[in-house]
Image: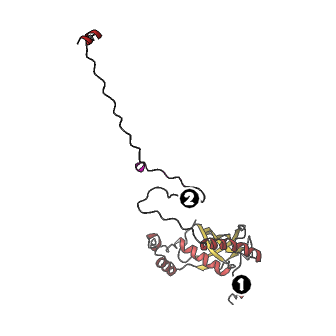
């Protein structure tokens, strides 16, 4: 008989409902030659490492195909988290997987980071190990995601406060800036304050200077060089 799922099993779990340290082992899946060819066509990976195989050896499965299969198996055989955003994938592949190999994945919830304030999401980290049927490790990595929280009434109000503040700031009327007249350079002068007379720089060209009157001085007689005649000489003449 196949596995049966109830509606409760298919409901996404919140951050608070995910069990820290929980471990889930998925079912097995055999990688076929046709799946490798189809994945190569979908991803556009036509490098010789993905489409060619050595004589007498099966084709090697691309590492990205292993990640996709591990994530797909995890969505079937582990609790479905209420993911809002996937954060990162960090993987390494110590052993190659060939066509015809059977693999399975083991998911472990290793981290539940404390939420910041009244945030509606928090980060969760899973460790994923991919093994072949004989137990050899062929891929390992981490998957991080932001998972929605199950907020109470007060926490919902706190989480909605930043969004409401951002919306109010966006809808607030903006202060209109004064336009600078064409051809003007430099900073715009501030308007004068009430009750204070603005200082105006005088224009020196418009200041009228008083005219000076010319005063004529009497001419003085010139003195000749040499001895001056006496008074008697002047009288006899």
- Crowding around mark 1 (Cα neighbors within 10 Å: few <14, some 14 to 19, many 20+) is few
Q: Above or below — where is 225 with respect to 133?
A: above
**Disc marking residue 192:** 2
At horizontal 50% and vertical 81% (from top left) the residue drawn is: 34
Residue 130 in the image: state x and y as whole percent: 62, 72
Q: Nearer the viewer, residue 38 or 233?
A: 233
Q: Nearer the viewer, residue 65 or 219?
A: 219
Q: Label the magenta part by its dominant secondary structure.
A: loop
Tell me if residue 200 is in the magenta stretch: yes
Q: Specify the quadrant that holds the C terminus.
A: top left
Name the front one of labels 1 and 2.
Answer: 2
Residue under numbered circle 1: 9
Q: Above or below — where is 224 with respect to 191?
A: above
- Crowding around mark 2 (Cα neighbors within 10 Å: few <14, some 14 to 19, many 20+) is few
Q: Nearer the viewer, residue 194 or 6?
A: 194
Residue 28 in the image: state x and y as whole percent: 63, 79
At horizontal 54% and vertical 71% (from top left) the residue drawn is: 63
Give the left or right position of residue 210, taking residue 86 as reference: left
Residue 160 in the image: state x and y as whole percent: 69, 74
**Disc marking residue 108:** none
Q: Secondary structure at mark 1?
A: helix
Give the left or right position of residue 161, taking residue 88 as reference: right
The magenta stretch is 197-211
Tell me if residue 43 is in the magenta stretch: no
């Amino acid at each position: 008989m196949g596995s049966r799922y109830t509606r409760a099993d298919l409901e996404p779990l919140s951050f608070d409902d995910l069990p820290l340290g929980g471990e889930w082992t998925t079912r097995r899946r055999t990688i076929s030659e046709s799946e490798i060819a189809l994945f190569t066509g979908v991803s556009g990976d036509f490098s010789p490492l993905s489409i060619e195989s050595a004589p007498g050896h099966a084709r090697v499965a691309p590492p990205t195909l292993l990640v996709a299969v591990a994530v797909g198996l995890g969505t079937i055989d582990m609790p479905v988290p209420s993911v809002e955003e996937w954060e990162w994938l960090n993987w390494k592949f110590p052993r190659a997987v060939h066509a015809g190999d059977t693999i399975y994945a083991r998911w472990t919830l290793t981290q539940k980071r404390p939420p910041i304030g009244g945030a509606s999401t928090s980060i969760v980290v899973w460790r994923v190990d991919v093994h072949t049927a004989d137990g050899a490790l062929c891929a390992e990595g981490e998957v991080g995601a932001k998972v929605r929280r199950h907020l109470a009434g007060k926490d919902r109000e706190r989480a909605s406060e930043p969004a409401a503040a951002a919306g109010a700031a966006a809808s607030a009327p903006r202060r209109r800036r004064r336009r600078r007249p064409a051809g003007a350079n430099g900073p715009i002068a501030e308007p004068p304050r009430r009750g204070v007379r603005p200082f105006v720089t005088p224009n020196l060209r418009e200041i009228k200077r008083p005219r000076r009157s010319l005063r004529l001085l009497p001419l003085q007689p010139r003195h000749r060089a040499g001895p001056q005649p006496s008074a008697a000489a002047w009288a006899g003449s």
